[in-house]
Image: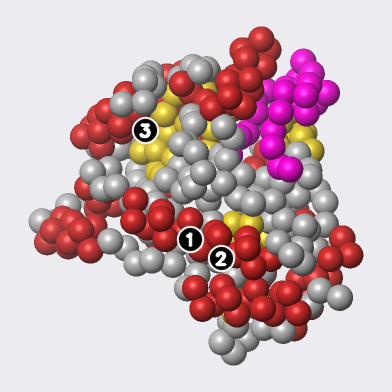
Amino acid sequence: MLAKRAGQIDSSGIRKVFDLAQKLENPINLSIGQPDFDLPAELKEEAKKWIDAGFSKYTVTQGTQELRDKIREKYREHRIEFEEVMITCGVSGGLVLAAMVLFEEGDEVLIPDPYFVMYKHLVRLMGATPVYVDTYPDFRLTVERLEGRFNRRTKALLLNSPSNPTGVSLTEDEQKKIAEFARHRDLLVIFDEIYESFNYDFPHANIARFYPKTLILHGFSKSHAMTGWRLGFAAGPKLIVNEMIKIQQYSFVCAPSIAQKMGLAALDMAPDERIADYRRKRDIVYEGLKEKFNVVKPNGAFYVFPEAPGGDGEEFVRRAIENNVLIIPGNVFSEKNTHFRISFAAEDDVLRKGIEVLNSLVQ
């Protein structure tokens, strides 16, 4: 009865932990990949205004012109010019559309490992082959690591910076070198920068500034706590984005209308105060774990990806859950089972309790 593609993927390991969380009593939850702050008051008021105004119908498939224009303006400030922009149902919606438009049987897609959980499954659903680029132990993508994985079937490089699950951000110099690698091979870069605002140690860099054959995927879920409003955008080569718009017409139809109005207001808001708060949370977790765990200090996002004692991520996560701490095994995000992911999008006292328990589990 079912199509073969349905059997090619399993339910997300993250969702399994979320389901488990419902069964535990007051767990110390360090698993959730969404901001712990509320939707800003300004955006609540914006939503109410447009609800009252009855702005609840379909928009055009590609999104409202005013939001698309404002996104263009935002990137022009960073010397990036796009051929086309469309509004999507979150970055996830953009990823689905991009995969449908770009990938097919016989194609190979470079994916740095560790990776966001959706990447490899979307590539497989389209019949293409994910090719993993090992970035352990420092989680930095280099040209040297890319060299041996490219061949004539390679269609694209899927890049995420700052990264989920490692929290590593690529510097401008690193991205320039990757751009040069891609240029010499006429390789499409898909750049997921949903955590753009969450950079703690140096300014965010965008590879599209150095390489025009880049498809940008971005959204408002993390920076403005709009996870449930499902608002994102895709920007880049007109040939690709126009085809994504065509597929959206027959799938998602359009992004939520009121969320698009909220997006206009969100683009005028600077999340500086919240980012400073998350930098402090990053430091609480890193400083709390570094004595007992082999851990890379994250530059961005709100995750840290420590190595599990004994090198068995699943076993350590099982022990943590037995002690009422929810974390995610690293093999959800990797072809290896050596690490685990912590989200520090939580209150400070929850972070400190979690650190105390995790440290106590180290022999």
Q: Identify the residue at image location x=58%, y=20%.
A: 176
Q: How crowded is mark 1: few (under 14 residues within 10 Å), some or many (20 or more)?
A: some
Q: Mark 1 points at which residue?
A: 280
The residue stretch that appears in magenta:
138-160
**Quick check: 129 left or right of 175?**
right
Q: Mark 3 points at which residue?
A: 86
Hey, which quadrant is residue 19 in on the image?
A: bottom right
In what quadrant of the picture does the C terminus appear? bottom right
Q: Identify the residue at image location x=38%, y=66%.
A: 37
Q: Which amino acid does label 3 sit on?
A: Met
**Quick check: 117 left or right of 345?**
right
Q: What residue type is labelled 1?
A: Arg
Q: Does the magenta stretch include residue 145?
A: yes
Q: Residue furthest top?
A: 184
Instruction: Between residue 362 and residue 184, name the one nearer to us.
Output: 362
Q: How crowded is mark 3: few (under 14 residues within 10 Å), some or many (20 or more)?
A: many
Q: Which amino acid does label 2 sit on?
A: Ile
Q: Residue furthest bottom?
A: 25
Q: Are marks 2 and 1 in contact (CB under 8 Å)?
A: yes
Separation of marks 2 and 1 at Cα, in angstroms: 6 Å
Q: Name the residue under label 2.
A: 284
